[in-house]
Image (cartoon, rainbow, N blue to C red):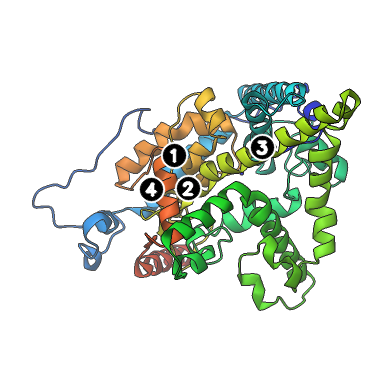
Amino acid sequence: SCSSSSSSSSAASSTPLKLRRPQVAPRVMVPAPGTISIPVEEPGREEPQKGVSLRNQGKYTGDQAWLNTLDLEAFRKDIRDLGKRLESEQGEADLAHLQKIIKWSNVFGAVGLLTMGLSPNPISVVALSLWSFSRWTMIAHHSCHGGYSGIDTTGRFNRGNFAIGSFQRRVSDWFDWMLPEAWNHEHNNLHHYNLGEESDPDLVERNLQFLREARVPKPLKYLLVAGMIMSWKWLYYAPNTYKELKVQELQKAGKPVPESAKESFTIYKLHRSDIVNPIEFLSKVMGPYFLIHFFLLPAPLALLGPVFYAHGVVNLLLAELLTNIHSFMMIVPNHAGKDMYRFSTPTPPNSGEFYLRQILSSANFNLGNDRIDFLSGWLNYQIEHHLWPNLSMLSYQKSQREVEAICAKHGVPYIKENVFLRTKKTIDVMVGDASMREFPAEWSREQAAKLKSRETAL
């Protein structure tokens, strides 16, 4: 997966970066970009493909029939090798691309800040919104994942430094409703390595079960969803990420974790929480951003008169609404819809099924060039990002066609769809008009047994 203060713009300025050139691994053969290999069933062929037992041949039917013949180990090797190659090729071009995105973000920030004293207008609102959006979804998101840690020796965009460790770093690197340390734990660890499982904190279908089952008129459900979309960053994301951080602290201290930890946590539950201290949360997480971003940031406009200051506050508030809508559409539909899978069993990181799940429970949007990808927050490469969270934005752009070709080669479904269609499918799940697919647990258990058998043999 950025609203900012007045110091954020300077923090995102183009800082000279020293390069450490990685060793380049030998290239592996993968399908050429744009080439899609479609598996063809050979007439009269009865023997199973490598790695598939005879008793499993034909067990799964319909649009899950590909599970009968998937060579999971070969699939894992193709994905792993492509990831290693991409990582070995990262260097100067990736850092230059990051600086380009930072410059674009700063331009929008400058336009918004210089014009927000005017009457509320779309230029100021859109510019301020894109400034916040890009700081979070592109600069912070990929830096916090370590996408530039291996090539930026200055440490400026190292995941161990970026936006964490001090209030000054938070303000200058990525200032938003969420506490960076909390978001790093909830998103980078819990979400990415439990995708689609019951332990995934961002599982939409489970988190919205109360609304799905509510016996209220459908228009009221849609009204509630609209309210969530316009406020989800502070309504849900900031408190829920902080709750997960506090749960981790309890676990590290060997203290019992309350049963309420299993539930999603919103701002409405703050007053009765047995995990999060309301005063601590407001003073440490949301309060500083609220005061600095919406009141101190436009303060210089007060020198021109109270009307200009009021205009600045209103433009910032409208930009916040737009950022919530924009970021919701680019983030939440990535993993929700009737064609996305849920999983009832865990799976080891970087195993064949782990890679498979990142694809089956993720969706890409329209993509292809920096302008489209910038407006999408680089979240339109969600499949590639979940396969290798620690790569750069440029690497995802380079790898997309190759990943799609690998999926076609192995018969694995690869979903790439318009963001508005994905948003509609997500809302259908939220209000109870559709449900996500349950992945066959028996298949997962069989693969886990095979993996254990191979490890034992080694």
The amino acid sitting under disc 4 is Phe
Q: Which residue is mark 2?
A: 333
**Disc 1 vs disc 2: Cβ atoms closer than 8 Å?**
yes
Q: Which residue is mark 3?
A: 318
Circle 1 or circle 3, nearest the eye? 3
Give residue 318's position: percent from left, percent from top.
66, 37
Give residue 89's position: percent from left, percent from top.
57, 29
**Disc 3 vs disc 4: Cβ atoms closer than 8 Å?**
no
The amino acid sitting under disc 2 is Pro
**Residue under the image location 64 percent in, 23 percent down:** 123
For marks 3 and 4, the one nearer the N-term is: 4
How packed mark 3 is, by other alpha carbons closer than 10 Å (few <14, some 14-19, many 20 or more), is some
What whole-number distance in Å separates the C-alpha atoms at marks 4 and 1?
28 Å
Q: Which residue is mark 4?
A: 75
Going by the image, does 130 lie left or right of 248?
left
| Element carrying mark 3 | helix
**Disc 4 vs disc 1: Cβ atoms closer than 8 Å?**
no
- Depth check: 88 or 243 in front? 243
Going by the image, does 374 lie left or right of 362?
right
